[in-house]
Image: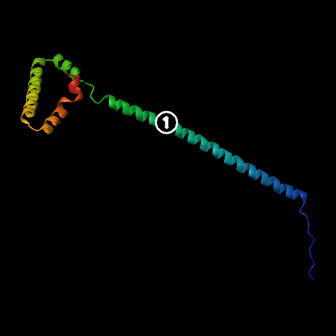
Amino acid sequence: MKKKQPLVPPSPSSSSHLTEKKKLGRKRVKREKSRTYRKMQNLEEQLNIQKRINEKLRKRLYRANQKHIDPNSPRTKVKLLFKGPNSAEKAKKMLLFQNVLLEGIKKKYKLNKSEKTKQLITKGVLSNQLLKKYR
């Protein structure tokens, strides 16, 4: 028969030393985890701020581009035309062109017999918003 060795209970100093090490290790892990969590929260907040700034600037750029599509209205163009030198000659040319265009549209309208083409001409030319505004 084999002799059984008596079970020696671990000494109190060695077991308490191990538990202290475990506690310190767990504490260190928790500290590191909370530090990374705070860092992640901070970075997400900064990302959201930058996204808002980006969206704001994108909208500002879009609005600025929309404003400068054509800064000169027809009235402004006429005023500028009469301000410059040789304004009478330029005005004559423009009036001649506009009258020729108007006569061409009128002739086309009179020559067309069908209602559909007349409606298309009317819709395309006479219902224009700018034409109504500057009548």
Q: Residues within 10 Å of mark 1 (few under 14, many from 20)?
A: few
Left or right of 75, for residue 93: left
- Depth check, front residue: 46 or 55: 55
Q: Quadrant of residue 79?
A: top left
Q: Is residue 92 above or below residue 118?
A: above
User: Residue sitting at 22 percent across and 25 percent down?
Assistant: 132
The amino acid marked with disc number 1 is Arg
**Picture quadrant where residue 134 is located:** top left
Question: In the drawing, does residue 133 fall left or right of residue 49?
Answer: left
Outermost residue on the bottom side: it is 1
Q: In percent of the image, x 16 and y 35: which residue is there?
A: 119
Residue 22 in the image: above or below residue 95: below
Direction from residue 110 to residue 25 in the image, left or right: right
Front residue of 89/130: it is 130
Badge 1 marks a residue whose secondary structure is helix
Q: Position of residue 54 (x, y in %)?
A: 46, 37
Q: Position of residue 89 (x, y in %)?
A: 9, 20
Q: Residue at x 13, y 38 (%)?
A: 117
Which residue, given by chain and number where applicable, does mark 1 sit on?
A: 52
Quarter the C terminus occupies: top left
Q: How is the image coloured?
A: rainbow
Q: Nearer the viewer, residue 133 or 85?
A: 133
Task: Judge by depth and name the residue closer to the eye, 100 or 47.
Answer: 100
Give the quadrant of residue 74. Answer: top left
Q: Position of residue 36 (x, y in %)?
A: 64, 46
How many numbered dots are placed on residues in this image? Answer: 1
Residue 121 % position (x, y): 15, 34
Quadrant in the picture for the N terminus: bottom right
